[in-house]
Structure formats: C-alpha cells, structure tokens
Amino acid sequence: MAFGSYRDFIEQLDKAGELVRVTRPVATELEITEVADREMKKPGGGKALLFEKATVNGQISPFPVAINTLGSWKRMALSMGANSVDDVAAELGSLMKAKPPTNIRDTIKLLGTALDLRHAKPKIVRDGPCKEVIHKFEAPASRSEPWPDALSLSELEAGKGASETLLNLPILKCWPLDGGRFITLPCVVTKDPDTGERNVGMYRMQVYDDRSTGMHWQLQKVGARHGRRYYETGTRMPVSVFLGGDPMYPFCATAPLPDGLDEFLLAGYLRKKSVDLVKCETNDLEVPANADFVIEGYVDPSEPPRMEGPFGDHTGYYTLPEPYPAFHITAITHRKDAVYPATIVGIPPMEDFYIGGASVKLFLPIFKMNFPEIVDIALPAEGVFHNLVFVSIKKTYPMQAYKIMHGLWGMGQMMFSKYIVVVDHDVDVHNTSDVLFRLCANTDPQRDSIFTKGPSDVLDHATSEVAVGTKLGFDATKKLSGEGFKRPWPPIIRMSESVREKVSRMFGNKA
C-alpha cells in the first residue's frame, strides 16, 4: 500500500501495536540514541518509537522524531503493505521468471521491465505537500563570498537566528564522540550530467552550520561517481535531499539496485502506486511530492573538501574524520505536520539489520537467476551487512562453491564482503549456529579456503589502506572426489522419520 506521509505510516504502526509514543521531553543530543538503542536490542527489534517532544538545545521541536520504524520483520512487511517480505520477494521472482536472462546485463534489463509491469514510471506533478512551508536562503553572489548571515551552532544556542534552518530541525547527535549532529535517513537525489539518469542514495550528512553539511558519499557510490563528473567540468552540482514520505523511499535508497535503474521505479512497484515527483524550488531535480522535508542545494567543485566525522557507524566503531564535499543549502521545504525520520547505527543488532535483510530477501530471486544453484543467502547481524555472508547451494559438481564466491564478489555491493561461507542446500543459513557447525565440521582450513584481493568498504577501519582489502572464502560443503578428497564422506547423524513421528505421537511436543 502507498503511504501519503511518514505520519500515515506511523499511524498504521500504532494501529498494529508496533509503536511506542514517548510523551516526555527527550534530548536529540545522545538521549534519543540511548532510548532507541535499548529498544533495538530487544528480541525481534522491539517497537518503533515516536518522540513527541524531542528537544533541540533544550527547546521542544515542533517536529516529532520517529525512529526504529523499519526495525523488525513485521514493520518491514507493513511498510510494503504485505504479510511478509518473503511474499513480496516471491512475487518479484515470479515476474522475473517470465523470460530467464542469459547474462548480468539481461538481468538488469529484465528487472527494470518487471518493476514497470504493474505501475507507470514516476510522474511529474506541479505541487505537493512537501512545499506547504518554504524557506529559501540567499546564496553568495560569487564563490569567494561567504554566505549571508550564516550561523554556527554556538550562535544558535546563544539565541541568534529566528528563521528555520538546519539548526532548528531535530537532527540527532547520536554518540558521544560524533563530530556533530548527523542526518541519518537522508534520501540524496543526484543526476548523471551526461545521461540524465537519476540516483537516490543514502549518505549521512554532518551538520556544519545552519546552511551546510558534509556529503558522505563513499568512493564506490553512484552519487560520488556523479560528483566526479561535475568536478571534471568544474560546474556546481545540484543536489536535493528529502526525508520522510512513504517508508519505501529510504528503503529503496539503500537497496542494491544496479547502476542506472531508478530507485523511484522500485518504490512505485513496492508501494503499488507510481511516485509523484515535484520539481525543487532552487534546482531542477525532482523529489517525492509527499516527502516530509526537502533540503535543496549544491556541491561546489571549486571548494576543497571539508573534514567530516567522527561518526559512530554501523561497523560498531567510530569512523574517523576524512575529507568529503560540503553541501550548501539553498532551500528547506516541508509539510506543516512533518515528522522527522531518523535512525541510529552502532553495535548490532540495530534497525539497519532488518532494512538490509529485506534487501537480501527481495533481490535473492535475481541472484538465483544468475546462480541457479543458490538456495538462500543470509547476512548475519554480527557481520554488519557485508562483512559476513552465508550462502547455501545445491552442489552438483566440483569447485562449485568457489564459483559462487567469485560470482558474488563481482556483484554490486557484494564486492565489499569480507568473508563468504558456502554450505550445502540442507543448511539453514539464517541459523548461525547451524552454519558454524558445518564450517567447523566440513572444512580443512588449507584445502577449503581461498584468499583474494578486492575493493573494501571505505568504513572498514581494519584494512591497511582505505577502500582496499582482502577477502576470505570457505567451502563448507560436502567434498567431492574431484576436489582432492579421497576418503568416504560420512553421513550426518539424523533420526529416522518413522521414529520421530512415533515419538511425537507418544509425547507430543514435550519430547
């Protein structure tokens, strides 16, 4: 189902018993993080939280803060208007099977066709709720001049500045050593200056002052690729950021879509309604008309990058300061009844485990189309997304596990995977204990492992060089004679089904 605003989604969560309303004042500086972290660590991800009186510098914000709204399998399914994420994945898989592709390029083309079968592409509308309140800022006349009346956080705390800016929004300072406040659920819209192809990514944004932030698009991200083209030409890069609206927007911004496939197309498919887009006030980019907040601006290639961070990241550690482009704000627009959506990341499990897990479920049919032997894939919470990948396969020939390892390392964001463990089809990859049992029982460390080199996550603090690292794959499947194994492979211990059924009849579920 399509949600008209983030508030609509929150009301749906409330009706489903999935929301806790926090009515007492809670500070956006660290306190919301502590409350949310405790909730996220509860079994099954806890409940969504709505802080109705979030405070900014001691003052209650007019905008409530919603967090952990996608932090469980049930809430992920509700955001998609489905009974389960598996149902949505199965439906997409059935559409993809209409014409089996023969290569990766065909798969990408077929995915675009499948997403477009039910709903039209995003359509442009003249106006929308995201423009109910409009604040524009006077830009400097030239690149060498400062922004008129720009305010620092300390000046705002001293009582200066009355207009609505970044510093008035309930943006969180998440962890004690963070370099400042960070927008943590921004949907960042950019366009390729050569092809006009749009991308919606999610890159954290550190607030520097009332009208500028960092733009943490990492080296391998599409937004960074778009940015490099603008840096080559020396022209200002238009960028727009939106928050809220339908919950499928932030999900699709994090989904591992192939480069060039519009995230709004996926959003339209998942919400069963095409996305209405409205042109921004100060640049030519389009954003969802039903967004809660829109932050418009640009990145200037003539400026040197600014230090961004530290930031308490999804790795469970702080990422240290690094230079990134600065994003300058030219306008902020929002709904009158806007809800500010946020998340936090840190030591798992957190809300992002369910968001990432839903992506894996949704795109598993696409993996299977290129690797039909794959049965299932899991990214355990302890692996903070791509550090650890479990894959089960229906093995039919020697070295098949290594084919899967290399294939996955060559697919999109799977290139960041540090460790891949391949197991047989009868292993539940979502049961970490089961996988570790097979890993320890079925491998000879030297024979059944492989080291290779490749790109690594920029946020990985353990690599010797930024964005460059090594990978390790384990073949924990039953070994075949063609794999250098000369001994008989023993059967795993299992009780006969007839005895299991007899004992169940005798003792029921007590045995």
Image (tube, helix red, strand yellow):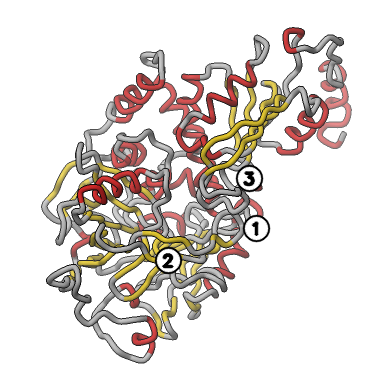
Position of residue 291 in the picture relative to residue 95 (left or right): left
Query: Which circle marks residue 146 in the picture?
Result: none
- Find disc 3 in the rendering and name its residue: 383
Q: Mark 3 is on which residue type?
A: Gly
Q: Position of residue 312 (x, y in %)?
A: 55, 63
- Which residue corresponds to the image point at 24% horizontal and 49% vertical from the top-left? 230
Between the C-alphas of marks 1 and 2, the distance is 35 Å
Up/down of 417 relative to 78, above or below = above
Q: Mark 1 is on which residue type?
A: Lys
- Find disc 1 in the rendering and name its residue: 42
- Find disc 2 in the rendering and name its residue: 307
Q: Nearer the viewer, residue 418 or 331?
A: 418
Res 427 → quadrant: top right
Classify mark 2: helix, strand or loop.
strand
Q: Mark 2 is on which residue type?
A: Met
For mark 2, does the 10 Å Cα neighbourhood hold few (<14), some (14 to 19), or many (20 or more) residues? some
Position of residue 428 in the picture relative to residue 39 (left or right): right
